[in-house]
């Protein structure tokens, strides 16, 4: 049996080493409660592990850590076992977790079901993690999220709990050591219909900061405040469809200037087995969160971080990477464009599959200025020029069609703007013909 388990584990690691972008992120492995953190320009996905599709209650024997450098290939780096912390060796209560980095060390925060939240430390994002306390950091309650504020002191906070126990989420400032509380936890006041109608058990918060506003989410809904302690005012849902509901445990993350939303969902009603999906996400002109459901409707199985030249359009807001101070502009109803593209700024669409040879590129553009040039290059901002398009000032978006020479295969495409001082470019979408 010992050798059987060894070979099963080895096969699992080998099968999980290369996973190409798709939704679900990695299929048929019970990926739940996903939190993505970026450490040293690498994505790390900390997740729960639903044991079997046949489980009718939560059987979660460990946590897992995956990494990626491109959103396409996800590598399992380690499993974190409850036998390595204060929990029971045979525990099946490895509920939601999160991770953080500070002072060159890494911290893994975990739920012991609803009994409490513990913390483990490591010199690397993937472990080996050790339990410095031998007991819970805070108890009771569960489902931690860590926010390190962008203020002068980079103050760390722990947010946790559920609506039922203690009547809501709680927050506590952490000490600089990240393994002790700097204050007594406080109840977070949330006002609004979405919170009032949330199920009594509602848990799994996520909190982040954007433009001096704190965003506190649960399920598909969220609230905002200009004070991390609250009170928070409900805004509404981040989106509808694709299992964005009260069970949508997840997180938001930034990567190369793009914003993403990852969440899990139950595959079959009555069974505690989940998978996780990722979509592009946007902050609209009023500071509201918009999870890109339209992308999922059209390209669910494709996943993020790669594209296909055969699509009707590749929307500009789905970019993989940007330079400079390029911004998104728009809203859920009218859609989004990218703006403030200045001289020498570029937009990257990585891993575009050209299923055949294409001869033309159609771009929906608006130039603010007298004249400009849009270059399309392959591989890098200084790579082979595939096309050049001369631009003139316009008052509204216009479709520009230009000749392009691109052969069959997978390529990174960079759109580089060259313009006069004070001029800028807006891009709505691109299409290949």
Image (cartoon, grey):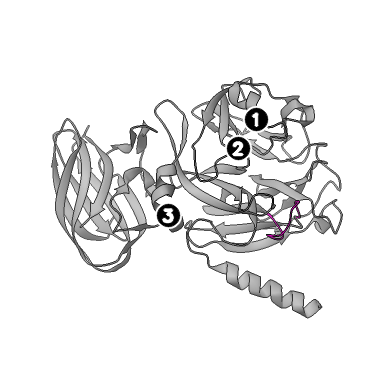
Which of the labelled discs sits on residue 219, or is there none? 2
Foreground of the two, 413 or 303:
303
Q: Which of marks 2 and 3 is nearer the N terminus?
A: 2
- In the image, is residue 2 above or below residue 308? below
Instruction: Report the magenta residues as a range.
Output: 49-59
| Sequence order check, earlier mark of 1 and 3 | 1
| Crowd band around label 2 with a 10 angstrom C-alpha radius: few (<14), some (14–19), many (20+) | many
Residue at (87, 54) in percent of width and height: 88
Residue 96 in the image, given as x and y percentages of width and height: 70, 46
Disc 1 and disc 2: Cα gap in Å? Answer: 9 Å
The residue lying at 44 percent from left, 48 percent from top is: 296
Q: Mark 3 points at which residue?
A: 305
**Quick one: SS at disc 2?**
loop
Task: Let me know if residue 54 is in the magenta part.
Answer: yes
Q: Can you identify the residue that label 1 sits on?
A: 198
**In this view, 149 is above or below 274:** above
Q: Is residue 142 above or below residue 126?
A: above
The x and y percentages for residue 23 are 50, 56
Q: Earlier in the sequence, mark 1 or mark 2?
A: 1
Task: Quarter of the image for the N terminus: give it.
Answer: bottom right
Instruction: Look at 50% across and 58% down and name the residue there.
Output: 69
Quadrant of the rendered structure where residue 341 is? Answer: top left
Q: Nearer the viewer, mark 1 or mark 3?
A: 1
Nearer-the-camera pick, 423 or 13: 13
| Horizontal side, residue 397 vs residue 162: left or right | left
Question: Mark 2 and mark 1 in contact (Cβ < 8 Å)?
Answer: yes
């Amino acid at each position: 049996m010992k050798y059987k388990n060894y070979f099963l584990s080895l096969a699992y690691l080998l099968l999980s080493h290369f996973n190409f972008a798709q939704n679900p992120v990695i299929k048929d492995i019970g990926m739940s409660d996903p939190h993505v953190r970026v450490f040293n320009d690498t994505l790390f996905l900390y997740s729960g592990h639903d044991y079997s599709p046949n489980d009718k209650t939560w059987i979660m024997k460990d946590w897992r850590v995956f990494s990626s450098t491109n959103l396409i290939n996800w590598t399992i780096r380690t499993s974190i076992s409850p036998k390595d912390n204060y929990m029971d060796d045979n525990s099946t209560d490895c509920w939601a977790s999160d991770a953080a980095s500070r002072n060159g060390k890494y911290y893994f925060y975990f739920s012991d079901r609803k009994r409490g939240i513990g913390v483990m430390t490591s010199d690397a994002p993937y472990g080996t993690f050790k339990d410095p306390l031998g007991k819970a950091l805070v108890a009771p309650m569960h489902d931690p999220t860590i926010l390190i504020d962008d203020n002068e002191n980079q103050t760390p906070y722990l947010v946790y709990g559920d609506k039922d126990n203690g009547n809501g989420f709680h927050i506590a400032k952490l000490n600089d050591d990240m393994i002790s509380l700097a204050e007594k936890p406080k109840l977070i006041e949330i006002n609004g219909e979405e919170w009032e109608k949330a199920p009594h058990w509602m848990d799994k918060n996520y909190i982040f900061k954007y433009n001096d506003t704190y965003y506190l989410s649960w399920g598909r809904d969220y609230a905002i405040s200009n004070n991390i302690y609250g009170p928070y005012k409900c805004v509404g849902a981040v989106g509808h469809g694709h299992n964005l509901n009260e069970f949508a445990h997840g997180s938001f993350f930034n990567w190369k200037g793009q914003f993403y939303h990852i969440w899990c969902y139950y595959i079959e009603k009555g069974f505690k087995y989940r998978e996780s999906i990722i979509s592009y996400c946007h902050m609209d002109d009023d500071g509201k969160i918009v999870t890109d459901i339209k992308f999922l409707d059209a390209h669910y199985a494709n996943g993020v971080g790669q594209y296909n030249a055969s699509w009707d359009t590749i929307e500009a807001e789905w970019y993989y990477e940007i330079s400079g101070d390029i911004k998104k502009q728009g809203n859920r109803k009218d859609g989004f464009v990218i703006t403030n593209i200045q001289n020498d700024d570029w937009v990257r669409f990585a891993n575009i599959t050209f299923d055949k040879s294409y001869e033309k590129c159609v771009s929906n553009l608006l130039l603010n200025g007298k004249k400009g040039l849009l270059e399309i290059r392959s591989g890098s901002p200084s790579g082979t020029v595939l096309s050049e398009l001369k631009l003139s000032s316009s008052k509204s978006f216009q479709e520009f069609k230009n000749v392009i020479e691109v052969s069959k295969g997978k390529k990174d495409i960079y759109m580089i703007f060259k313009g006069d001082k004070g001029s800028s470019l807006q891009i709505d979408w691109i299409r290949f013909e």
